[in-house]
Image: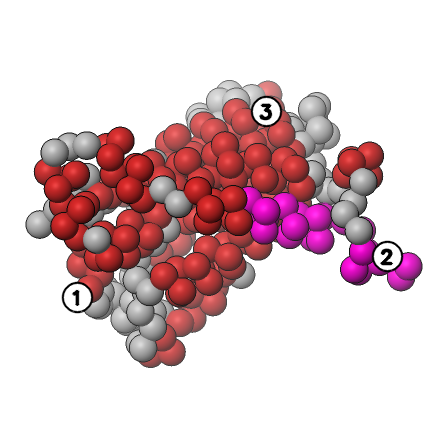
Amino acid sequence: GEGEREGEARSEGRFGGDMAQNWDYLDLGHIRATLIRQEDTILFNLIERAQFNRNLPVYQPGAAFLQGTDIAECYTKHLLQETEAIHAKARRYTSPDEKSFTPSDKLPKPVLPALEIPENMKYLQSIDVNINAKIYETYVGTIVPWICKEGDDGQYGSAAVCDILTLQAISKRIHYGTFVAESKFRSQPEEYTKLIKAGDREGIMALLTNSKVEELVIKRVQKKATAYGQEITDDSALIGPAVPEEELSNYKVNPTLMGKLYHDIIIPLTKEVEVDYLMQRAG
């Protein structure tokens, strides 16, 4: 997966590792390529989660299926903390583009040596923006009901494992807004500094918003959902006219819904991260 590839690339103790020393992480081309790759990860994880019912018990503390265990919180949160504890030992959350859902003081220290963060990324390392609490609530309360059938199929372990992968993918995409914000700040430092010092969140939001790019992202995600979500058979047309509305219900994840996910949730939360970051950036 994406995290594994990045883990391999970082194995030399530098952010990005020897394989990527020449990458400019703040180059808009590199940022765009990363965001596009993250779209794939999110879509595939949503398709995986959508094969199971909503399974409300995995989000309920003290659910009946947890009786006899020592798990006090809901199962998805429990599994998320257990997963993040393992990843923390591999220094996942020392990278500026990774944010944990579990409070850092409840996670173990990395067993690997600390990463060297390049000088041009010192602000990304020092400014802490983490909206994972909001991402979790939005995922459980809005996204899961959008993509999953209502009801309980008893597949609690499988549903929760899919939840972890999807939450991590969505969180990474949204928090990559800090890289976008840093790049934008460097392209217009005077304009942003003036707004930051004035505490003008609305002005910052207006300056960083590019509606044309947002529309392109939404269209691209819908096209990907159309391609990835359908069953490909020997007689499937790989190139053809737009899919009729009545056929969209046959798709694992509705393409229109994926556009809505980006329009209503992922893009607005990414921009919220960008503004939160920039409010701490002047200097």
In front here: 234 or 205?
205
Q: Give the SS element for disc 2.
A: loop
Judge whether 143 appears above or below 4 on screen: above
Residue 190, percent across and down? 14, 50
Q: Is residue 263 left or right of residue 283?
A: right
Within-10-Å neighbours for mark 3: few <14, some 14–19, many 20+: some
Tell me how far mark 2 sits from mark 1, CA to CA: 51 Å
Tell me how far mark 2 sits from mark 3, CA to CA: 38 Å
Q: Which residues are magenta?
A: 218-240
Residue topped by disc 2: 236
In front here: 8 or 42?
42
Residue 82, percent across and down? 43, 44
Residue 193, percent across and down? 14, 45
Within-10-Å neighbours for mark 1: few <14, some 14–19, many 20+: few
Answer with mark 2 or mark 1, whichever residue precedes in sequence.
1
Residue topped by disc 1: 119
Tell me how far mark 3 sits from mark 1, CA to CA: 46 Å
Give the residue drawn at x 39%, y 54%.
87
Within-10-Å neighbours for mark 2: few <14, some 14–19, many 20+: few
For the question of whether residue 264 can be seen, the reply is yes
Residue topped by disc 3: 57
Q: Nearer the viewer, mark 2 or mark 3?
A: 2
State yes or no: discs 2 and 3 in contact (Cβ < 8 Å): no
In front here: 175 or 256?
256
Say which amino acid is labelled 3: Pro
Q: Give the SS element for disc 1.
A: helix
Find residue 110 and report its image quarter.
Answer: bottom left
